[in-house]
Amino acid sequence: MTTKVEKSIQVDVPVNQAYNQWTQFEDFPHFMGGVKEVHQHDDQRLHWTAEIAGVRREWEAAILEQVPDQKIAWAATEGATNAGAVRFEPVGPSSTLVYLTLEYEPEGLVEQAGDKLGIVERQVTSDLQRFKELIESEGYATGAWRGSINEGLNVGTPGVETAQMTRGDSGKAGVSATTVAAGAAAAVAGVAAAAGAAVAASKSGQETEQAQPEQEVAVVPQPPAGEVRQDVLVEGTNPEGYAARPSTEGVETGMTDPEGGDDPMIGGGNR
C-alpha cells in the first residue's frame, strides 16, 4: 500500500529565485530535516540518504522532467520506492507558491506504524517551512541550474508505479533513468500510434471489403421435367426384414415394414 503527501507553501521571493534554490539538491540537508545526504551524479541522476523516525533509507533517483521556473519531476530507480514532483507558480512579481507531491511505499512495521501516525506528512510540512525561512532570510539562491530535461514530455506527477521497483532497500530491479524517461515518452507516443493503427485498420478493412471478387456459379444442365435419367439409378438394397423399391433422382424413397408399420427412425409414423 502506498501513501501520497501533497503540501504547498507560499514563499516571498520571485519564482526564479525559489526555483533556483530548489535545483541545489546537495543543499537539501540544510532545510530538509529527514535528508542526510544528496549526491548528484549528473544533471539527471541523484543518490539520496534519508532518516525518518529512526529508519534509514537510501535510493537512486532519476529526474524525468525539469522545466525552469515551473516543475521538477522524479522517480526512484533503485532502493526505497518513491516518486513525485514539485511545481512553482508565481504570485505577483515577488512571491511564489511551491507545490510538493510525494508518493512512497512504507516498508516494515516501524515505517508502517510511522505512516499511520503521519510522521512523513509532518516532516514534509516542516521541511517546506524551513525552505521558506532559508530562501527568505538569505534573499538570494545559493546556486542555480537553468537547464531543462525532457521539456515538453509532460510526464505529469510520477507515482510509485513509475519507479518500477522491488520492495525494500535490497531491491535491485530498478530501471535506469534513460529507460524510465523513454518509457514515459513511449506511453505518449503509443497513444498516437494506436490511433493511427486503428485508422489504418479501418481503411484496410474497407478496401478488403470492396476488393472482394465476384464468384462464378457453375450451371449444370438439368434433364426435362418427368424424364428419368438412367445413369443415376441407384440399385436398392434389401435389409433383413424390409422390402425397398429402387430410387431415382426426384423420386421419394421409403422403406416399409413387412408388418405394415412405419420405422420411426426413417420418418412418418409414431415414436
Image: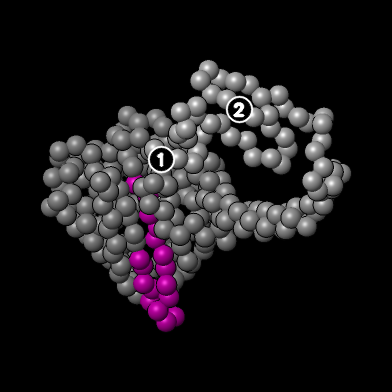
Circle 2 crowding by C-alpha within 10 Å: few under 14, some 14–19, many from 20: some
Callout 1 secondary element: loop
> Is residue 87 rendered to the left or right of residue 240?
left
Looking at the image, tell me whether mark 2 or mark 1 is earlier in sequence order: 2
Indicate the quadrant containing the C terminus: top left, top right, bottom left or bottom right. Answer: top left
Where are the magenta residues, as a range?
A: 82-99
Query: Is 85 contained in the magenta span?
Result: yes
Q: Main secondary structure of the magenta part?
A: strand
Residue type, numbered disc 2:
Ala
- Counting every numbered tag in the picture gives 2
Where 16 sits versus 29, above or below? below
Camera sees residue 54: no
Residue projecting furthest to the front: 259
Which residue is depicted at the point 29% across and 34% down? 168
Residue type, numbered disc 1:
Asn
Residue 37 lies, in percent from the top left, at 33, 43
* Image-quadrant location for residue 109: top left
- Decide which of 22, 221 is in the foreground and name it: 221
Which residue is depicted at the point 34% across and 61% down? 100
Which residue is depicted at the point 57% across and 25% down? 243
Q: Nearer the viewer, mark 2 or mark 1?
A: 2
> Is residue 137 rendered to the left or right of residue 21?
left
Residue 247 lies, in percent from the top left, at 69, 32
Camera sees residue 191: yes
